[in-house]
Image: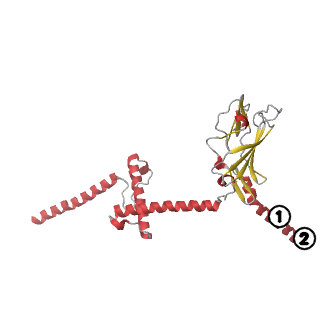
Amino acid sequence: MVAPCLWGHGNLLLAMLLALPALIAAADEKPCTLHYGSNYYDLSPLKSSKDYEFDIDGGRKLYVNVCRGVTTDPWNTGVPESDGDIAGLVRRDHGDFVIGMVNTTLEMVGGGLVIRQSNGSPCKSMDSARGSSSIRFICDTSVYGAGTPAVIDKYPPNDDACHYEIEWRTHASFACPTGERGFLSGLFVSCVITAMIFFMLYMVASTLYSHFVLRLRGPELMPKFTLQHAHEILDISYELLHSLLDRFGATSGVWRNTGYGNLNPASHHWASRNEQQAARASDALESGGAGYSAAPQERELNT
């Protein structure tokens, strides 16, 4: 009895572990993105600082944006600002008709990406109804750039339509499935960029060290890739940093008061210019004192 129970619970635990990545991906779905099967879709590149503008029936203009509110100033829409950002609007004679508020949730319908937008302006021909729209994005490699949306249907089919069906053929880089950059690939790219930065810094530091410290010239300035040379560069970099901190402490007193301005036994650098001058003066007195002490001895011998 115990073995079958453990086997059953083990299968349940295995199924939960297998489903966990999909649940995490669904929970962490970014705005305007969709995981569908093994494909990944991202419409965020269609965001634009300028609205997409095109003509519809009757010579009216329709302004729409993707995954963000329109930048065109709305006029007499009948929609409170507290309702959110306007996804699109139709410019009419007595005011703008909002065809929906911003929605960043993508759906896969009939093999195409769809964004549904609702809660727009009140409809004149339909009581308690509000403007809405559906935008179907079609991957078309023959289209250059973002493409241009077009109204393919509306309801009611007159100038006071309340719902708009929009078809948007766009380039592969927008509506076609793309590869999603995972954690490992992102980590690899970050490591490569970091390594390149350190490599360039090492080349610059090696050249400066060879020129100013080793006094080398010409081809000898070429960076050396040895452990000893790297250790020397690290040492001189540490010394330079310590010297800069000492100079900062000498002017502000903060570094010296915290107890870090002591003598560095490895580099034999004094903590401050005053201490160094005092040490030199002490050495001079000692050398002078030795001369003075020898003079009386000579006078005693002469006498």
Q: Quadrant of residue 67?
A: top right
* Camera-nearest residue between 219 and 170: 170
The three-letter code of the residue at mark 2 reads Met
Q: Is residue 182 left or right of residue 100?
A: left
Q: Residue furthest front?
A: 58
Residue drawn where x is 55% and y is 62% of the image? 192
Residue drawn where x is 72% and y is 51% of the image? 138
Image color mode? secondary structure
Give the image location of residue 178, x and y in percent.
67, 57
Position of the C terminus by quadrant: bottom left
The three-letter code of the residue at mark 1 reads Leu
Q: Residue furthest top?
A: 94
Residue drawn where x is 80% and y is 64% of the image? 15
Q: Is residue 181 left or right of residue 227?
A: right
Q: In the rendered image, is residue 40 in sight?
A: yes
Give the image location of residue 191, x and y in percent.
56, 62
Q: Are there few (<14), some (14-19), or many (20+) residues within 10 Å of tag 2?
A: few
Q: Is residue 161 left or right of residue 171?
A: right
Is disc 2 in contact with disc 1, using a CB cutoff of under 8 Å?
A: no
Q: Quadrant of residue 93?
A: top right
Q: In the rendered image, is residue 118 in sight?
A: no
Q: Is residue 58 left or right of residue 285?
A: right
Q: SS of the residue at dot 2?
A: loop
* Camera-nearest residue between 125 and 253: 125
Give the image location of residue 39, x and y in percent.
72, 58
Residue drawn where x is 53% and y is 60% of the image? 194
For disc 2, the marked residue is 1
Q: Residue furthest left?
A: 303
Q: Which mark sits nearer the N-terminus, 2 or 1?
A: 2
For disc 1, the marked residue is 12
